[in-house]
Image (tube, rainbow, N blue to C red):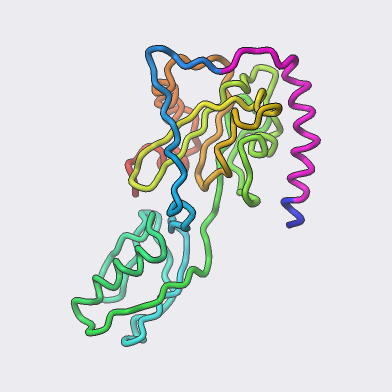
Amino acid sequence: MLIMSRLRLSVLTGAAGLAALSGCMGDPLPVQSPDFTMTPYPKWRAEDENYRFYPGDKFRLDVRTAPELSGELTIAPDGRITLPTFGAVMAGGHTVRELQVAIEDVYAAELRDPSLIITPTDFGSQKVFVGGEVKAPGVFELPGEIDVVQAILLAGGWTEEGKPTHVIIMRRVPGGDLMTRVVDVRNGLARHDLYDIGPLHRFDVVYVTRKMIADENLFVKQFVRDALPIDFSLFYDVARF
């Protein structure tokens, strides 16, 4: 709570500085290219609030009828776990309930009652990348639920060359789809709806551009190849685990 209180205070003080750096608020809003349709974020769904496992996460597995199969498991970098005597099972991207069902299906081949309990015990790093025209680009640990403006403030705010009316957000969603969205952060300081996409997720990418974007797809392809740090580049360059 103390971390978030300080972060909120930095937002209030930093927002004024960002607005002053931006000059007047009269610049035009982002204009969608007639030859390119921006990819919208899908509508919020209730199931999206359920936590999904990622590599590095740990959980306790308790099998009531076979305690010798119980223990703590760590999700490997490829998203899989290794069950004793049963082999690898995909865990990355699953909710607790989904993973429980998947493991029970595996154990059902040998156990009369494969029912089990999964209890998350530790979570891997939850990071976002903030890059482009910001003063201190880099990978940042999520201090809690933060939005796009707060992420940019973590990176020192945008530079004089930055185009805060065109900030690209990238997110990989369950199933492997890559969502991208251009948001207007500068004018969003006065109109929150221009950049409000809710709190950032683990491995989101926030990129402040230095010019108007005519072709978002082309920009993202070049960006993924040339600009992302290796751990994020691998994540955004593959379909899913």
Residue 138 in the image: state x and y as whole percent: 60, 37
On screen, 33 above or below 188? above
On screen, 131 above or below 83? above
On screen, 43 above or below 3? above
Residue 210 in the image: state x and y as whole percent: 59, 18
Q: Main secondary structure of the magenta part?
A: helix
The residue lying furthest to the left in this view is 109
Magenta stretch: residue 161 in it?
no
Left or right: 74, with 88 as reference point: right
The residue under the point 20% across, 80% down is: 110
* Quadrant that contains the N terminus: bottom right
Residue 118 in the image: state x and y as whole percent: 42, 72
Left or right: 2, with 140 as reference point: right
On screen, 210 above or below 4? above
The answer to which quarter of the image holds residue 98 is bottom left
The residue under the point 18% across, 76% down is: 109
Residue 77 in the image: state x and y as whole percent: 40, 55
Q: How many marks?
A: 0
The residue range painted magenta reads 5-29
The residue under the point 62% across, 33% down is: 137
Magenta stretch: residue 14 in it?
yes
Q: Is residue 230 or residue 115 the one in the foreground?
A: 115
The residue under the point 43% across, 24% down is: 38
